[in-house]
Each structure stands twice: as C-alpha cells, then as structure tokens.
Image: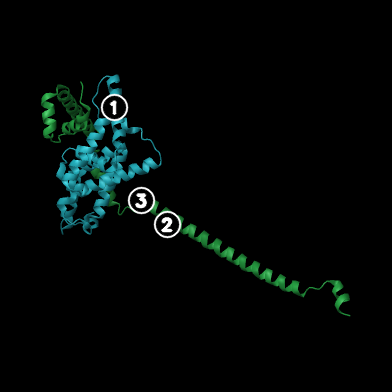
Chain colours: A cyan, B green
C-alpha cells in the first residue's frame, strides 16, 4: 500500500512515512469531517458515506495540497460541499429522510419527553434547512466543536467579519422563527 | 413582558452579542419591559445555540479509518456515483446527437428524392399529349 500511496503523497518524500502521515491526519480530522456531514445530512449512513468519499478524494488529490497544515480546513471544506451536494440530490429526488431519529444522541428520558425533543429537533433541522445556504454553512460549521471563527473563515475562504455577520443573521433568523412574537 | 416595538430589532441584535447603541443602552436603563425582554431573548438564544450544537454532536463509527484505507488499497475509485452520472450524461448527449444527425440526414435525403421526383414528373408532364391532341395538331 505504501508503494501505491507514494505517488500522491505531498507530505513527505518517504512513502512509508507519508502513508502513516495520511492515516494520522485521517484519524485526527475524521470527527470534524463526520460532524459537518452529519450536521448537514442528519443521518449516520449518509454522513459516513460522505466522510469516506471526502478522505478518498483527499487522498487522490493530496498532491495538490501545498500546505499540509491546511489539511483539516481542506477536508472540512470538502465535507461541507459534498454533504450539501448530497442533500441537494436527495431533495431533488424528494427522498424524505426518516432516519434522522434513529440512534439519536438525545438524552434518555420518558417517552413523552423524548418525543417532544425529537419533534423539536426535527423542526429545528427543517428550519436550518430553510436558511440560505451561505448562512446554513456558517451556522453548522460554527456548531462543530473546535471550529472557531478563524477556522470557519479559513474553511469557507471568506473574511472572519463575514463569518460573524452570517452567523449573526442565521442565529437571528432562527431565533425569530422559534419565538412567539 | 411588554417590549417597545421600535427597539425590538436592536434588542434581538444585542441579545445575539452585538453591542448596544448608546440610545438602546439609555432606553434599557429606563424601560423594565425591554430589559426583561432582553434577558428573555438572551436565554432563548443560548438555548437555541445549545440545540444547534446537539445536531452535530456525533461520533463517526470506529471503522471509518479502516474503510477509507481499504478504499485506498483497492485502487482508484472509478465508479463513483459522480463518475456514473457524468458518463450517463455524456452517453445521453452522444445518443441524442446521433439520433439528431441520423434524422436530419434522412430528412435531407427524403427532401432530395422528393424534389427529383417532382422534377421528373414535371418533365414528363410537359411531354404529355392528350390522345385528342393528335387530331387537333397533327393535321
């Protein structure tokens, strides 16, 4: 495998080291990549497929990544883009994803509380999906633990001020939609 | 809780951590309703932020890295859905082009055949004589 990988590795000239390096970065960034995909798609199976696709693409295009330090932002951006594409395709096919609730991470509670929480989260997800894509991307990336404004700006290739402004608009729209007045 | 309508937008902006203008600050110092509304909007915003975070708090399966590495091992992924979609689209365009060209050529051929037939029919018609013409002109 090291031999097969050596031609695309941009991290190092030594192929064995490169293979280990890619694997290390894959393990380091898998959570961010997965959480972004899950945030957009809302179900494990699709998020897993998108994450796998992200890393396979990243591996194939690794030679084009000049700065290895930008690997995390690079795969995070790919994850957002592929997840949004995936969602658009699903929307076009009018495939309603009902697995959002399956294996939910919601806290265990009485059946009634759980149903209410699921309803609320379902509505929240729908409202987020109704946001313009630019606002949605910023909102979801900002919700991923460990991504600060600077990193979100780096991922999206926009100024930090724009991230703050879009995040404000997204939060305000959501707040208005979930408020009685 | 009574909020002064003219301050509502700015109040929400301030609840979402945007600095308050001097005018809003002065108003909040004197209006108990708006001060209470601000606290309420802040609490709602905090709750909503927490709810949004729960939508992405998720761990990938433990075998994601091994799946990726196995995918790399098995060589370049040629038959992804994107590749298939692209291939299908190119195929469709190609087939449509062939059908169009074939139809167009067929139509052209028919048109030529028709015009040739019309021309020869016209020529034949100009040579045609009615049987009675012999009686009228051949005398």
Residue hosting label 2: B90
Q: Which quadrant would residue A175 be assigned to in this image?
A: top left
Distance between the alpha carbons at the discs numbered 2 and 1:
44 Å
- Mark 2 or 3, nearer chain start: 3
Q: Provide residue A172's location: percent of width, then percent of height.
A: 23, 34
Judging by the rendered image, the residue that carries numbered circle 1 is A120
Q: Quadrant for the C terminus of chain A, please.
A: top left
Quick one: SS at disc 3?
helix
Q: Secondary structure at mark 2?
A: helix
Return the residue at label 3.
Answer: B82
Q: What is the distance, in whole Å, between disc 2 and disc 3 at their CAs?
A: 12 Å
Residue count near mark 2 (Cα–Cα under 10 Å), binned few <14, some 14–19, many ≥20: few
Where, by quadrant of the figure, is residue A116 drawn?
A: top left
Residue A128 visible to the viewer = yes
Q: Chain of mark 1?
A: A
Residue B100 x %, y %: 52, 60
- The residue positioned farthest toward the bottom in the image shown: B139
Which residue is depicted at the point 35% across and 43% down?
A: A88
Kindly indicate the quadrant of the structure image that contains residue A65. Answer: bottom left
Q: What is the x, y in percent for residue A18?
A: 17, 54
Do the numbered discs 2 and 3 sit on residues whose CB atoms are within 8 Å? no
Q: Which mark is residue A28?
A: none
Alpha-carbon neighbours of circle 1 within 10 Å: few (<14), some, or many (≥20)? Answer: some
Return the residue nearer the eye: A87 or A137: A137
Look at the numbered discs 2 and 1 and tell me whether their residues touch, using CB distance below 8 Å. Answer: no
Task: Report the Cα–Cα distance between label 3 and label 1.
Answer: 35 Å
Q: Is residue B126 left or right of residue A4?
A: right
Q: Chain of mark 2?
A: B
Secondary element at image label 1:
helix
Frontmost residue, A156 versus A32: A156
Above or below A173: residue A29 = below
> Residue B86, percent across and down?
39, 54
């Amino acid at each position: 495998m090291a031999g097969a990988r050596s031609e695309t590795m941009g991290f190092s000239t030594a192929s064995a080291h490169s293979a280990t390096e890619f694997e290390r970065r894959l393990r380091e960034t898998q959570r961010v990549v997965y959480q972004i995909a899950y945030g957009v798609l809302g179900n494990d199976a699709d998020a897993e497929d998108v994450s796998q696709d992200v890393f396979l693409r990243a591996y194939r295009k690794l030679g084009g990544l000049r700065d290895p330090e930008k690997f995390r932002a690079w795969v995070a951006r790919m994850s957002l883009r592929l997840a949004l594409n995936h969602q658009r395709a699903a929307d076009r096919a009018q495939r309603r994803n009902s697995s959002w609730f399956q294996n939910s991470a919601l806290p265990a509670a009485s059946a009634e509380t759980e149903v209410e929480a699921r309803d609320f989260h379902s509505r929240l997800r729908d409202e987020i999906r109704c946001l313009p894509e630019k606002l949605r991307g910023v909102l979801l990336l900002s919700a991923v633990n460990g991504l600060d404004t600077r990193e979100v700006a780096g991922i999206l290739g926009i100024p930090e001020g724009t991230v703050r402004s879009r995040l404000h608009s997204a939060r305000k729209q959501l707040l208005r939609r979930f408020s009685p007045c | 809780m009574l909020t002064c309508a003219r301050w509502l937008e700015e109040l929400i902006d301030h609840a979402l951590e945007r600095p308050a203008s001097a005018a809003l600050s002065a108003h909040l110092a004197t209006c108990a309703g708006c001060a209470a509304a601000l606290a309420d909007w802040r609490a709602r915003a905090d709750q909503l932020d927490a709810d949004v975070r729960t939508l992405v708090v998720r761990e990938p399966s433990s075998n994601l890295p091994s799946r990726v590495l196995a995918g790399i091992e098995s060589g370049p992924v040629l038959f992804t859905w994107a590749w298939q979609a692209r291939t299908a689209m190119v195929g469709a365009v190609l087939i449509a082009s062939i059908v169009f060209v074939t139809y167009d050529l067929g139509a052209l051929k028919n048109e030529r055949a028709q015009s040739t037939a019309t021309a020869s029919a016209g020529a034949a018609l100009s040579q045609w004589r009615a049987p009675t013409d012999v009686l009228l002109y051949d005398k």
